[in-house]
Structures are given as structure tokens and as C-alpha cells.
Image (tube, rainbow, N blue to C red):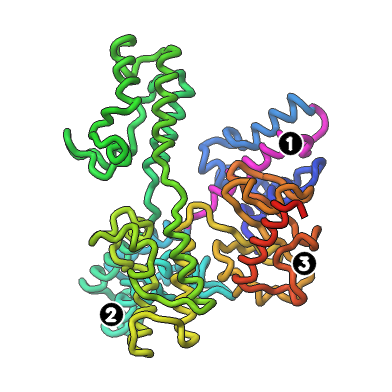
């Protein structure tokens, strides 16, 4: 049975997706938590009654614009606020990685023993019925399912060899050392913060405050890259200007104006020049955002061809990422940024290479057996996770989401006999969507997620076949054909 939070998310999803006029259902969270003391919303905001949430914004809008009509989605502003509440509710979901880190902190504090037989939140999420660890961060890091090639396996082997059973209370110094290794391994899986986006967010706040920095907001870029008067190595600002300490940027103009005219950069009160210079700094930082990574897409295509077609692996010689980033240290390669290791360590690549060497006496080449294709597919799926805005595939029958079509395709086998299916596609902009002009499509959020119910317009479905199955190759050609048809107005 779903938790009250997941039931609430389902209800708000239903409310946001439907036609205007839908009425809000009773709240499962309210039913479960009564006066809010244990409600995750209060734990997040510190306030009861859903104060300081988008739900209250929606209520205020209804009172002001649609008084007396009840909790209904009456206009597009209502829909926007409902979507805002839905996204807020999703932030309340527990992070299974953080739960697993907390579990191993307890095991370490207990001397390396797990007598309570605590569940693994990562396994609960990624290794349930029909799953095989495919999207688990441990699997993505090591390239292996079931925590192979992780410190956990060494801990299990030691517990069984020295203490007979992994969940008894016996412990020793080695138990604690191995538990510490697993704890640090899990901590290393935490996503790395995007410090450029944090700095952009800071300057958006400064602009909104009329060019003032009353809150003395820190600079995430400085926190990460500034190590001395002449340092700032690897900071994107220095890479752009060639100078440390933000010289030759609008920040220096803003700083100089604030000191000369207002006496201090942190004092209250701004002027039109403060705001103008803050806006220049904001636009400058936005210009530092990386452009779309063509080399990543070429590498994804390489491994897709190996896994599903007739492609081959020639190591660095036909790896677009290596050609762009490999300089002996892989600096700025998106693979390094994901794994924090050079030369593709921490990816499924070496499992592929080991198998090729042991089973086929070669280091690369084409896929020659089912195991080859399975390992190539793991590398392909891993690379797709590096995209900033991956495609998302949603099965409406079991509500599972997948960032890779090929992972979704495996799951699809359990749903093939069902009569309908819905697919959610993501494009970088509306202009790229071949279905943009269809009445059944609508942009439902600012990240250009375009939702299309293919069951309602089957003649537009690019994946339609007699058996309602498709391969990734057919997907690519179908999307290309759909775009060509749109451009040609046919």
C-alpha cells in the first residue's frame, strides 16, 4: 500500500493533469497525521496548517479571484499553483541514499555490527520486483548489481568468515574498518553541487533586492575554487576572463559602485545603477553555462550501436569524450564529474573490458554474445544519466519512470498486453517537439516537459506498430520522421 505522502502526490498529479473544473480530493496526509505534528510538510516548513507552502498560495488565489467556488482548478493560474504544490510535495520524499548513509553510520557506531538487521533503502527502491539495481547509484558507480565491487561485499565476507552470521552482535576491529569503508563509499555517491547555478541563484536574489546584498550571501564559486590571492584555478569565471578574483567582470563594477556611492557593499538601499550592474553580473554568470555536450551524445550513440546494433569499441580512438577531454587527467569530462575518478574507473566500462578479454581474448571490438550486449547496455545507460535533461519514460500502469528508453523497454515486457500506454517525452525546447502544434499537447512546466497522451491520438504516435512494441532504432527513425513531417507540413 502506498504511503500517505505518495497517495497525496498521486492526488495532486491527477488534479494537475485533468481538465479545468476538477475538485481537490481529501488530503491523505491530513487523514494520517491529524494535527500535523508528524506530518512531513510541518517537518519541512516548521509550521502547521500547510502555511508557507504553494497550497496556501492556491487558497489565497481562489479566495481573491474565485471566491465561493471551492477548491477547484478554475483557471491556468490555478493549474500553475497546483503544479507548484505537486513539485513541493515531491521534495518531501525520503532520499534512499541518505537513509542508507544513516544506516551505515549506525553500524559504524555499533562497532561494525548490524544486529537489528536494518533494511537497505537503496535496495527497497532499486531492487524490488522486476528491478535489477539498474538505476541504483551503487550499480551506476561500480557497473555491477547486488553491490558487487563495493566495500559492502568485503564486510559481508568478513562477517560470515569470522562471526558466522552477518546480523549477530559480535564485532571486531576489522568489522568497524570495513563498515567505515562502506559508509565513506556511500557518502561519495552524493550528487555534486552545481556551484555555478548556486551563484546564478544568488545574483538573481541580489537583482530582486534592487541590487543589494543585505543577507551577505556567500559565493558558491569562491567557496569551491578560491584558495588564495592569485588562485581561483578551475573556476569558470577565471577560465572565461583569464584573471583571478573576478577581475574584468561586472562584479568588480558593482563592488566599486557600492563602496563609492553607498559606503559598503552590504548596506541597505540600492539604486538603479546597483540593479543594472547586478543584472550585468547575473547575465555574465549565465553566459558561463556549458553548451550542449555533442561529445557526450556521440559517446552515447557509440555504446547504443554496440549494445543494439553493429557498433564497436576502439577505446579512446572512437570515444568522442576522450577526444575532447582526455589529457592524462580527464579534466572537466562529465564522466569524471559523475564518478570523481579518471579514465572511466567507477563506470561499467571495465566490466565490459574484462569480459571481452576473458571470454573473447580482445579488449574491445563488437558485441559477440549476450553478455557483451548486456555490459555494453550498462555503459550506454550510465552515459545517458549524464545528460542534463534526459528523456523520461513513464508507464501509467505501474507509475515507474525511466531516464533511458532501453531500461524502460525491459520493464515494458510486463505491460505489453495492456490496451493503452502513455509516454512522457522531454525536449530542450518546444521547438524541438514534433507534436508541438497538436491540440492534445501542452507545456506543463517551465522545464519544457511536454506531455502527450498517445492513446488519444494514435495516428500521431511515432512508436506505433502492429504489436505495439518498438526498438530504440525504430524510436530514433520514428522521431526523425515525425520532425520531418512537421517541418514539411504534411
Q: Give the numbered dot on residue 279.
A: none
Q: Magenta includes 93? A: yes
Front disc: 1 or 2: 1
Callout 1 environment at 10 Å: few (<14), some (14 to 19), or many (20+)?
A: few
The residue wearing badge 2 is: 158
Of marks 1 and 2, which one's residue comes earlier in the chain?
A: 1
- Could you tell me how many numbered marks the image carries? 3
Q: Residue at x 70, y 48 (%)?
A: 436
Residue 363, position as x, y percentages in the image: 33, 81
Query: Magenta segment, which residues?
Result: 67-95
Callout 2 environment at 10 Å: few (<14), some (14 to 19), or many (20+)?
A: some
- Is 177 placed left or right of 186 in the picture? left
- Is 369 placed left or right of 238 in the picture? right
Give the quarter of the image for residue 105.
Answer: bottom left
Callout 3 environment at 10 Å: few (<14), some (14 to 19), or many (20+)?
A: some
Of marks 2 and 3, which one's residue comes earlier in the chain?
A: 2
Q: Secondary structure at mark 1?
A: helix
Residue 160, position as x, y percentages in the image: 32, 83
Q: CA distance from mark 2 to mark 3?
A: 50 Å
**Location of the C terminus (image quadrant):** bottom right
Q: Residue at x 79, y 28 (%)?
A: 66
The residue wearing badge 3 is: 420
Q: Residue at x 49, y 67 (%)?
A: 301
Q: CA distance from mark 3 to mark 1?
A: 28 Å
The residue wearing badge 1 is: 76
Q: Secondary structure at mark 3?
A: loop
Residue 374 visible to the viewer: yes
Amino acid at each position: 500500500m502506498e504511503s500517505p505522502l505518495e497517495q497525496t502526490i498521486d492526488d495532486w498529479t491527477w488534479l494537475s493533469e485533468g481538465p479545468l473544473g476538477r475538485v481537490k480530493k481529501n488530503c491523505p496526509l491530513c487523514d494520517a497525521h491529524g494535527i500535523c505534528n508528524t506530518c512531513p510538510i510541518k517537518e519541512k516548513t516548521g509550521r502547521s496548517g500547510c502555511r508557507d507552502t504553494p497550497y496556501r498560495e492556491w487558497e489565497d488565489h481562489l479566495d481573491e479571484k474565485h471566491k465561493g467556488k471551492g477548491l477547484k482548478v478554475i483557471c491556468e493560474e490555478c493549474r500553475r499553483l497546483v503544479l507548484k504544490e505537486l513539485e513541493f510535495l515531491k521534495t518531501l520524499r525520503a532520499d534512499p541514499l541518505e537513509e542508507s548513509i544513516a544506516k551505515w553510520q549506525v553500524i559504524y557506531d555499533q562497532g561494525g555490527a548490524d544486529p537489528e538487521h536494518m533494511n537497505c533503502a537503496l535496495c527497497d527502491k532499486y531492487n524490488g520486483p522486476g528491478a535489477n539495481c539498474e538505476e541504483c547509484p551503487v550499480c551506476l558507480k561500480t557497473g555491477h548489481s547486488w553491490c558487487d565491487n563495493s566495500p559492502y561485499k568485503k564486510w559481508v565476507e568478513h562477517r560470515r568468515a569470522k562471526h558466522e552470521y552477518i546480523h549477530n552482535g559480535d564485532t571486531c576491529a576489522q568489522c568497524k574498518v570495513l563498515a567505515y569503508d562502506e559508509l565513506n563509499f556511500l557518502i561519495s555517491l552524493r550528487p555534486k553541487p552545481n556551484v555555478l547555478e548556486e551563484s546564478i541563484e544568488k545574483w538573481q536574489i541580489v537583482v530582486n533586492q534592487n541590487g543589494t546584498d543585505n543577507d551577505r550571501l556567500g559565493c558558491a564559486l569562491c567557496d569551491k575554487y578560491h584558495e588564495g590571492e592569485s588562485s581561483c584555478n578551475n573556476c569558470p569565471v577565471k577560465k572565461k576572463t583569464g584573471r583571478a578574483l573576478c577581475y574584468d567582470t561586472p562584479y568588480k563594477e558593482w563592488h566599486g559602485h557600492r563602496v563609492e556611492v553607498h559606503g559598503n557593499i552590504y548596506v541597505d538601499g540600492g539604486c538603479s545603477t546597483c540593479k543594472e550592474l547586478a543584472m550585468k553580473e547575473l547575465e555574465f554568470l549565465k553566459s558561463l553555462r556549458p553548451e550542449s555536450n555533442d561529445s557526450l551524445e556521440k559517446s552515447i550513440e557509440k555504446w547504443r550501436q554496440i549494445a543494439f546494433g553493429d557498433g564497436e569499441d576502439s577505446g579512446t580512438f572512437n570515444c568522442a569524450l576522450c577526444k575532447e577531454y582526455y589529457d592524462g587527467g580527464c579534466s572537466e569530462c562529465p564522466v569524471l564529474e559523475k564518478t570523481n575518478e579518471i579514465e572511466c574507473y567507477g563506470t561499467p566500462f571495465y566490466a565490459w573490458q574484462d569480459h571481452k578479454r576473458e571470454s573473447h581474448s580482445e579488449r574491445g571490438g563488437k558485441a559477440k554474445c549476450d553478455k557483451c550486449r548486456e555490459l555494453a547496455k550498462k555503459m550506454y545507460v550510465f552515459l545517458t544519466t549524464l545528460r542534463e535533461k534526459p528523456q523520461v519514460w513513464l508507464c501509467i500502469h505501474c507509475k515507474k519512470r525511466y531516464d533511458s528508453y532501453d531500461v524502460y523497454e525491459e520493464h515494458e515486457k510486463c505491460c505489453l498486453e495492456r490496451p493503452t500506454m502513455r509516454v512522457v517525452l522531454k525536449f530542450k525546447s518546444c521547438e524541438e517537439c514534433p507534436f508541438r502544434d497538436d491540440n492534445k499537447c501542452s507545456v506543463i512546466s517551465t522545464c519544457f516537459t511536454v506531455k502527450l497522451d498517445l492513446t488519444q491520438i494514435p495516428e500521431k504516435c511515432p512508436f506505433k506498430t502492429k504489436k505495439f512494441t518498438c526498438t530504440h532504432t525504430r524510436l530514433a527513425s520514428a522521431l526523425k520522421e515525425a520532425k520531418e513531417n512537421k517541418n514539411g507540413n504534411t
